C-alpha cells in the first residue's frame, strides 16, 4: 500500500483502540477476549481514504472488534502468559498487542475497501459505503422476514454484514473477471494440470478440465487482488 500519514494512522488507531478496549473492560471484563466494543461516538466520520473512497470510523471499529480476540490469543500463545489489560502495552517480538491490533485493523479495512471498489466498478454493488451496505442488509432482512419455507438465505446477521457482503461480492467478482480479464488460457490450464493431475482421484480425473479452469481463475484472482491492495493509495484524514 502507498500510505500517506502512516505514523498518524498508527497513532490514531492506537487512540481508538484505547477507547474501545476501555469500553470492553467496562462491559465484560478484560478476561473475555471476545467482547465486542460499542460503536464509536462519530461512526460516520471519515478516518481515511483508499483510492479516493472513504474508510469511516465505523469501519475501523468494526475490524478492530473482529481482530481483538485473535491478537489476545496470539499474545498468550507466543508468551505463555495469561491476559490482563496491562498486556496491551507489553512488547513481544518487536511490537505490542495494541500496535498489532492497530496494524491488523488498518490492513483489514484497506483490503475490504479495495475489493469493494472493484465490485462497484463491475456493478455488483452500487453503494459500497459502510452505511450503504448496512442498509442493504436491513432492507434484505425486512423483505425476507415473512419468507417462511423459501429456499436460500433468510436473514443477514447484522453483526457481520460487512464481511458478508465483502465475501459474497468477492465470489461474484471472481466469476465476472474469470469470464474476461482473468480468463485462463489453454496453456495456463495445461500447465496447472501437469503440476496437479497426478494427485487426482477418479472423480477428479473425470472433471480435470473444470477443476483446472476454476483453480487457475482463483490463483489469478488472488494475485490480481493482492496487487491492487499492494498498490492502493491510502490517505489518512487529519
Image: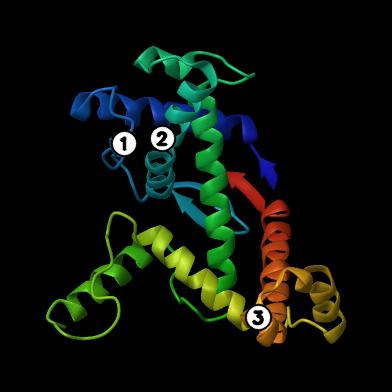
For residue 77, say whether it is visible.
yes
Using the image as rendered, state which of residue 76 and residue 17 is in the foreground: 76
In the image, residue 230 lies at what x, y percent? 71, 52
In the image, residue 29 lies at what x, y percent? 23, 23
> Which label sits on residue 34?
1
For the residues bearing labels 1 and 2, Cβ distance under 8 angstroms: yes
Instruction: Determine the CA span between mark 2 and mark 3.
Output: 44 Å
Number of numbered markers: 3
Instruction: Determine the CA span between mark 3 and mark 1.
Output: 44 Å
Residue drawn where x is 84% and y is 80% of the image: 190
Between disc 1 and disc 2, whose residue precedes?
Answer: 1
Count neighbours of disc 1 (C-alpha within 10 A) and say few if under 14, some if 14 to 19, many if 20 or more.
some
Residue drawn where x is 66% and y is 55% of the image: 229
Left or right, 232 with respect to 65, comes to right
Q: Name the residue under label 2.
A: 68
Secondary element at tag 2: helix
Between disc 2 and disc 3, whose residue precedes?
Answer: 2
Q: Mark 3 points at which residue?
A: 202
Instruction: Determine the CA span between mark 1 and mark 2.
Output: 7 Å
Residue drawn where x is 29% and y is 22% of the image: 30
Residue drawn where x is 14% and y is 82% of the image: 148
In the image, residue 155 lies at what x, y percent? 24, 70
Q: In which quarter of the image is residue 70?
A: top left
Secondary element at tag 3: helix
Left or right, 36 with respect to 105, comes to left
Q: Residue furthest front?
A: 202
Q: Quadrant of residue 69?
A: top left
Closer to the camera: disc 2 or disc 3? Answer: 3
Between disc 3 and disc 1, whose residue precedes?
Answer: 1
> Which label sits on residue 78?
none
Amino acid at each position: 500500500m502507498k500510505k500517506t500519514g502512516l505514523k498518524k494512522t498508527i497513532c490514531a488507531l492506537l487512540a481508538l483502540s484505547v477507547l474501545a478496549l476501555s469500553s470492553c473492560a467496562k462491559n465484560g471484563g478484560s478476561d473475555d477476549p471476545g467482547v465486542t466494543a460499542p460503536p464509536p461516538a462519530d461512526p460516520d466520520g471519515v478516518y481515511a481514504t483508499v483510492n479516493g473512497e472513504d474508510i469511516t470510523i465505523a469501519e475501523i471499529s468494526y475490524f478492530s472488534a473482529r481482530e481483538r480476540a485473535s491478537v489476545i490469543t496470539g499474545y498468550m500463545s507466543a508468551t505463555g502468559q495469561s491476559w490482563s489489560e496491562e498486556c496491551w502495552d507489553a512488547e513481544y517480538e518487536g511490537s505490542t498487542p495494541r500496535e498489532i491490533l492497530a496494524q491488523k485493523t488498518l490492513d483489514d479495512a484497506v483490503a475490504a475497501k479495495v475489493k469493494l471498489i472493484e465490485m462497484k466498478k463491475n456493478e455488483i454493488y452500487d453503494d459500497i459505503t459502510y452505511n450503504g451496505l448496512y442498509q442493504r442488509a436491513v432492507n434484505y432482512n425486512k423483505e425476507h422476514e415473512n419468507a417462511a419455507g423459501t429456499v436460500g438465505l433468510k436473514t443477514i446477521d447484522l453483526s457481520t454484514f460487512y464481511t458478508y457482503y465483502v465475501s459474497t461480492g468477492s465470489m461474484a467478482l471472481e466469476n465476472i473477471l474469470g469470464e474476461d480479464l482473468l480468463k485462463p488460457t489453454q496453456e495456463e490450464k495445461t500447465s496447472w494440470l501437469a503440476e496437479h493431475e497426478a494427485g487426482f482421484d477418479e472423480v477428479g480425473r473425470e472433471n480435470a478440465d473444470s477443476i483446472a479452469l476454476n483453480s487457475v481463475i482463483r490463483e489469478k484472482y488472488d494475485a490480481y487482488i493482492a496487487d491492487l491492495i499492494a498498490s492502493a493509495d491510502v490517505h489518512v484524514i487529519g
